[in-house]
């Protein structure tokens, strides 16, 4: 092996041959590997993936839905998860030990999940329990690392999705007086507000400064929000809604609850990715929608529903950059390495982390 080959292997750089292939050749190679491996291969694709990837997905869905489909698929030996790192981790946690989960490009992370690492969380927990005692139950959005899910599971909490967040927060308040909601402050704030918790009863924990951001007496706090956010959904603004209302008075605004409280409050409807898809699928022909979520999905909804007037709430929005790390060249590289008997970007969660992370997931699934 030459020094250049060694460096390429160590840095996980896409081999030049895949960079130089045409889209037609790459697509043909994906089909060839899928045909050769048959049921031994399973490719789940998140809704935010590009069309060039979704066309080859055995199932398209949100992160937890896809992980559960992986869990049910006992035939697949190789699960090539077209999403981001935390999604592949969840699939590994839920699948059997003899099944391998791969991520076509290890750079495909999630900025929100990365805003809460385990060291920050353990430090915050120590400081918050010193203030509030044994009155806090931790909850984490499934858009979090396996380590955070494990921390939550070990401390009596559970995971939540954007679909069941209200049910899970309601359950948590039945267990403890307060909740710590990781890592997305906007989903936590919107959910708690919908359940009647006042904005003046919510505080923000800043993991960078290790400080609680709150002006009132701490004993009035019911919800502790981690200072994290989705870099895509935080870019939808009140100004975007005002512009749509002015230009298209008949248009309804439909947003994801990872948007800010101000944006959600001014929207006509808000809900999970699945909720957004279902609303558009069931909308009347001729209806008009401004959608506040990831651009690949919005473009797909526009293409799939030509009988409706659909636009992005933010006309300058870009697709999720980390999700878009997954492309045809990386997918082909991953698949061909598997076919040749190699291991490519295997995602493996250690047993202890997986044990408590699964406990957090199971608590949610039992209640959902």
Image (cartoon, rainbow, N blue to C red):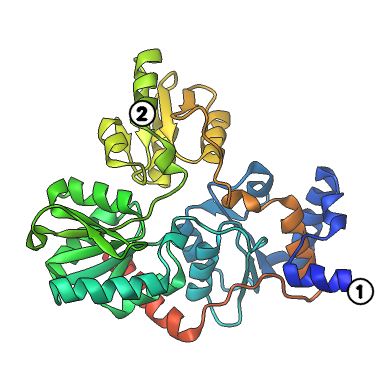
Residue 363: name its quadrant. bottom left
Badge 1 marks a residue whose secondary structure is loop
From what the image shows, is residue 326 above or below residue 119? above
Tag shown at residue 250 = none
At x 32%, y 39%, the residue is 270
What residue is pinned by disc 2?
Answer: 253
Precedes in sequence: disc 1 or disc 2:
1
Is residue 50 shown left or right of residue 356? right
From where the camera sits, is residue 72 visible?
A: no
Alpha-carbon neighbours of circle 2 within 10 Å: few (<14), some, or many (≥20)? many
Q: Nearer the viewer, residue 130 or 326?
A: 130
Is residue 80 shown left or right of residue 153? right
Q: Residue furthest bottom?
A: 352
Badge 2 marks a residue whose secondary structure is strand
> For the residues carrying marks 1 and 2, which lies nearer the camera in this image?
1
At x 47%, y 43%, the residue is 232
Q: Position of residue 51 (x, y in %)?
A: 64, 42
Tag shown at residue 2 = 1
Image quadrant for the C terminus? bottom left
From what the image shows, is residue 168 above or below residue 344? above
Q: Nearer the viewer, residue 367 or 4?
A: 4
From where the camera sits, is residue 96 visible?
A: yes
Do the CB atoms of the residues marked 1 and 2 lie less than 8 Å apart? no
Q: Position of residue 245 (x, y in %)?
A: 34, 18
Is residue 325 shown left or right of residue 361? right
- Give the spatial CA distance, label 1 vs label 2: 56 Å
Q: Position of residue 14 (x, y in %)?
A: 78, 60
């Amino acid at each position: 092996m030459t020094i250049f080959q060694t460096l390429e292997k160590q840095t996980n750089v896409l081999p030049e041959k895949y960079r130089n292939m045409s889209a037609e050749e790459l697509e043909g190679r994906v089909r060839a590997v899928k045909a050769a491996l048959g049921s031994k291969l399973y490719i789940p694709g998140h809704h935010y993936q590009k069309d060039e990837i979704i066309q080859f997905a055995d199932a398209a869905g949100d992160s937890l839905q896809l992980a559960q489909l992986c869990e049910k698929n006992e035939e697949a030996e190789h699960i090539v998860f077209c999403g981001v790192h935390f999604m592949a981790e969840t699939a590994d946690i839920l699948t059997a030990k003899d099944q391998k989960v791969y991520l076509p490009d290890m750079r495909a992370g999630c900025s929100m999940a990365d805003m809460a690492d385990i060291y920050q969380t353990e430090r915050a927990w120590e400081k918050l329990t010193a203030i509030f005692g044994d009155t806090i139950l931790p909850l984490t959005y499934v858009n979090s690392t396996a380590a955070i899910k494990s921390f939550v599971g070990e401390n009596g909490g559970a995971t939540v999705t954007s679909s069941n967040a209200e049910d899970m927060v309601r359950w948590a308040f039945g267990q403890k007086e307060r909740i710590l909601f990781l890592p997305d402050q906007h989903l936590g704030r919107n959910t708690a507000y919908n359940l009647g918790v006042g904005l003046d009863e919510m505080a923000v924990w800043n993991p960078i400064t290790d400080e609680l951001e709150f002006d009132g007496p701490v004993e009035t706090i019911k919800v502790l929000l981690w200072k994290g956010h989705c870099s895509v959904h935080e870019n939808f603004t009140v100004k975007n809604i005002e512009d749509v209302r002015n230009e298209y008075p008949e248009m309804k605004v439909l947003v994801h609850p990872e948007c800010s409280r101000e944006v959600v409050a001014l929207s006509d409807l808000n809900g999970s990715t699945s909720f957004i898809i279902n609303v558009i699928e069931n909308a009347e022909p001729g209806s008009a929608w401004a959608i506040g979520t990831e651009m690949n999905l919005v473009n797909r909804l526009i293409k799939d529903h030509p009988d409706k007037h659909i636009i992005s709430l933010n006309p300058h929005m870009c697709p999720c950059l980390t999700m878009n790390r997954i492309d045809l060249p990386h997918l082909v590289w991953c698949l061909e390495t598997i076919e040749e008997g190699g291991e490519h970007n295997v995602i493996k969660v250690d047993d202890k982390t997986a044990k408590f992370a699964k406990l957090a997931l199971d608590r949610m699934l039992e209640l959902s």
